[in-house]
Structure formats: structure tokens, C-alpha cells
Image (spheres, rainbow, N blue to C red):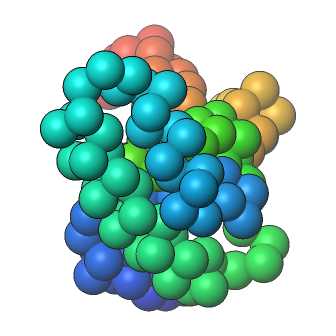
Amino acid sequence: MRMFIGIASVIAMVGGMSAFAAETGSPEQIASFCAEKWSTDYRMQENCREKQEDAAMKVRFAKGALSDESRIYPFCLSKWPYDSRMQHHCIKKQMQSLQDLSALVDAASDDYEKGGIVLECNDKWSGDYRMNLYCVQKQYGALDRLRGN
């Protein structure tokens, strides 16, 4: 748990951080991405380039902070190729979900049925901590209602 809090602190520290797809983020790739997105709006292209370049730099920093075993970075890179800002959002949400999921699992560590829920949700949503957390929360809630809690 301590490792997750440390990583989350690093992510929070870089605030506006974004990720950029698989070692991309070169000025040429950013320019191409922004030109495609805002073909005739040059003010928006300029704004897009500034935001994407800032995000790409911060993501390189965050990548170093994430463990090599972490599935978050590759998951977010593949989900949002070439969009630094959405990758950043994804990383932030995945880190928070992982932290929340860890707390839920710790709180129910002595409950056999809830342990089964965790395993099922992990199998179903492996690599996507946000959906994994949602699955666990919904299943825990239903189980608690069935138990009359």
C-alpha cells in the first residue's frame, strides 16, 4: 500500500501531467496530432501543441516513477494513443482506483466471499483498475444488501 501512496504522490505532484503514446511526444508527432485535430484553427493548434508538449515532458517523469511491473502506464498508452492529456487523465484515475481498490481489499481481508469477488473482478477487468474497482464496489454492495447489512 505504501508503494501506491508514493506513486500517487508523485502523480499528484506533477499535477497537469499527461502521457504520450509509446515513446512518442516528439515535436513533429505533436504537431501532426494537433494539426489533424484542429486542421484550420491555428490558435487551437498552438494551444494544443503547448499542452501536449508540457504533458509529454511530465509523462516521461511519471513513467520513471511507475514500477516496471505496473500495468497502468502501458494500459493508458494503448487506450489513448497520441493524446497526452487523455493519457494523463487515465494514469491519474487508474492510480487513484488502484489505491481505493487496495483499501477495499484490505478492509475485507477476512471475508471469504468478498475475496472471491475481488478475484472475479480482477479476472474480468485485468489491467483496468478503474473498472476493477467499480466491479468490486458494485458486487460488495450487492452482497452486503443480500446479507442485510
Percent from the top left, x then y, of residue 61? 51, 83
* Residue in front for this viewpoint, 111 or 61: 61
* Residue in front for this viewpoint, 59 or 52: 52
User: In what quadrant of the picture does the C terminus appear?
Assistant: top left
Q: Residue at x 25, y 70 (%)?
A: 15
Q: Residue at x 71, y 32 (%)?
A: 125
Q: Is residue 47 above or below residue 141?
A: below
Percent from the top left, x then y, of residue 60? 56, 77
In screen coordinates, is 133 left or right of 37?
right
Q: Residue at x 30, y 39 (%)?
A: 45
Residue furthest left as drawn:
43
* Residue in front for this viewpoint, 127 or 57: 57
Percent from the top left, x then y, of residue 103? 44, 61
Number of labelled discs? 0
Q: Is residue 69 above or below residue 139?
A: below
Is there any visible trace of residue 18 in the rendered image?
yes
Q: Residue at x 74, y 57 (%)?
A: 22
Percent from the top left, x then y, of residue 123? 82, 34
Task: Write down the quadrant of residue 129 in the picture.
Answer: top right
Q: Is residue 29 above or below residue 114?
A: below
Q: Is residue 75 above or below residue 102?
A: above
Is there any visible trace of residue 147 in the rendered image?
no
In screen coordinates, is 88 left or right of 43?
right
In screen coordinates, is 74 left or right of 56?
right
* Residue in front for this viewpoint, 3 or 148: 3
